[in-house]
Amino acid sequence: MTAAITTPPADNADLLIRTVALGKSYPQVFRPRDRLRALGKLLLGRTDIDSIPVLRDVSIRVARGESLGLIGENGAGKSTLLKLLTGVLTPSTGSVEVRGSVGALLELGAGFNPEYSGRDNIAMSAALYGLDGEAMRDKLPQIIAFADIGRYIDEPVKHYSSGMVVRLGFAIVAALRPDLLITDEVLAVGDESFQKKCVRWMEDYLDGGGTLILVSHSMYHIQKLCRQACWLREGVVAAAGDVFDVTQAYLAYHERKLASLTEARTISDQGVEFYLLDFTLNGVAAETPIFVDRGGTVRARTRVHSRDGRAPVVAFGIARADGTAVYGVSSEMDQVRPVAESSNVYVAEIEFHDLDLLPGAYSVKSHPMDSEGLRVFDTLERGLVVRGNSRELGLVRLQHRWNDVEPARNVDTRAVREARG
Amino acid sequence: MSDLTLLTMHFVRRELRNRYLGSISGGLWALMQPLAQLAIYGFVWAYVFRMRAPGGDASPAAIVPFLALGVWPWNAFSEAITRSTTAIQDNAGLIGKVALPRWILVLATAAASFLLHGLGFCAVLLLLGLLGMHVNLLWLPVALFVFAQLFVLALGFAFLFSAVQVFVRDLSQVLAQLMPLWMFVSPVLYSREYLPAAYRGWFDLNPFSFYPEFLRATRLGLGGIGIQAAAIALLVAVVTLGVGYGIFRRLDPRFEDFL
């Protein structure tokens, strides 16, 4: 953990956020008695309260001018992480360091009082951000213009639609222009034109050196606004890095999840002849993508259950993240037999060495087929990210060389053009 | 520091507005309510129970300033405590979305109560002065200092109770029952002399006793307050605030988990 943190001090100077092994647990309080017991323990200075971890071991760093997208399923811990970053929550383990002014839009209408008019709520939010009367009066017209909710600005916020609440909240943050902007799924509520306005504002803000942490379920917005992404899954970082790699891995995970839901049913319903028990890439069984350097080695191993004990044919394939097939081969084509592990279980492993795939996101698939190699019974898919820097185009690097060419003399260009049609 | 002052003032304003939002009489109600209370108590005490103010003045009207010097401090004290007990719980929505020092919420709620009742107290003194009572302007700063000391005491309880209330929601219900009881075991509507001699000493254990007794002693010349008793009362107020705030800070990081 600590090894990843050490960076040159020059780099640290511009770090706005750094979390180290950050974790959060919520106490388990089902009965009122648990609350009393928790109170007693806290008063005695003890921290051993029964709790459920919702976030574990999250280490992220965001430097000035960076933009980080947080993605993940509902309940993955995204909002909890944001609350820890803004200081609303206190970490259970690890630490958070935040520098500079932070503007946060957590959920709808951060801290608005429903009884107050929009105008009064602007004043209140301004006070919370430490803006006094005069600075506030300067910004007021700007906020009202950005929110663009007409006469509703003088109505109590409880009469607002959810879109209007978000408009007002975003307008306030936009006027304050904090060093770091943290927003939680606010774009989803606004209408089309307001979304565009917000996205344009955020792009402008980023161009002006602003720093953004955005939570969204819209991969379009994440990819448009963020250069980095972090995928939270069940409270831990499943993947982090370049926004395209992470979002692709995330989308692929969702497809696999959807597919496995339907597959699981058919297998149990019909008791098919062959199905896959597991599938590992370089020994990793997790559904998160594995990272391989260009020219590296990928070992794919799968175990197949055979209903009648007959040996299956096993096929492996590699496709680009968008589904374009790159290469596929089966054990039957290469006249290899999967190894019997028990009377009903067969294992096969294939190794792709000197991998000449161009950098990018790919998926590796595995299928069991009947003994004749005709029918496909099952599919499992794992993500594979090939790392490296290359400006070559396409999927794979083909063997090639550039030949020395003797320059031709006295060529009649008109004749060449006519010859080419 | 100026940021915190700004924020505190903002929350005091918000608290005052919230109390009278939508009511027609607005802030006037803050004065009307204790006045009505004083009139009722005065009537019941002077005409129904035929009680006379201690100190030899036998006229029924003499009970009014006697009661006023007990009722206003008590109202400020008990309202500050009961209202701030739920200050954290009532602002759960704000606490869950905005990072702010939570103690400001408790301070603002308690301060709003003392501000309203302090003003009411001054108004009543002026009113009594107009009705022919002798008003000593030099006494007013002394009274306000004691009021400020009472605020310190109330704030100590407010911090303690508001923090515990987050964990044990029964506290505000229990307090609603306990506060009237506390009033009747304090020298608010009567004075120490009304008790059998054997029990008079018990008032010394009640941290609130000092305040009405001090005001009555200095204003109406009833009984005497030694410098030692005043020093102890000041010490009790400061220690209560220290302990209350200490416990509040210990529980503060876990509020969000239990709200």
Image: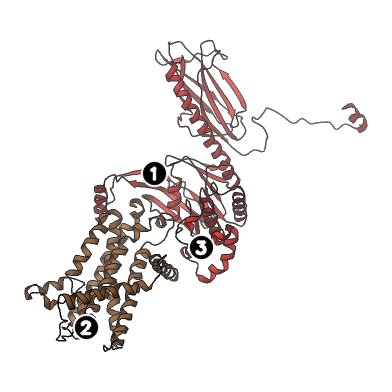
Chain colours: A red, B brown
Judging by the rendered image, the residue that carries numbered circle 1 is: A54
Amino acid type, mark 3? Ile
Task: Say which of A97 and B251 sits in front.
Answer: B251
Q: Is residue A110 visible?
A: yes
* Quarter of the rendering containing residue B225: bottom left
**Measured along the vertical axis of the image, is residue B148 above or below residue A330?**
below
Q: Callout 2: residue from which chain?
A: B
**Measured along the vertical axis of the image, is residue A254 above or below residue B7?**
above
Where is residue A144? Give x, y as percent.
57, 61
Cβ–Cβ below 8 Å for labels 3 and 1?
no
Amino acid type, mark 1? Val
| Separation (CA) of disc 1 from disc 2 | 66 Å
Judging by the rendered image, the residue that carries numbered circle 3 is: A122
Where is residue A389? Give x, y as percent.
62, 39
Residue placed farthest to the left in the image?
A: B198
Where is residue A32? Give x, y as percent.
26, 48
| Separation (CA) of disc 3 from disc 1 | 33 Å
Judging by the rendered image, the residue that carries numbered circle 2 is: B61
Image side of residue A361 versus residue B39, left or right: right
Amino acid type, mark 2? Ala
* Quarter of the rendering containing residue A210: bottom right
Residue at figure coordinates x 40%, y 12% from the top left:
A343
Disc number lying in front (3 or 2) = 2
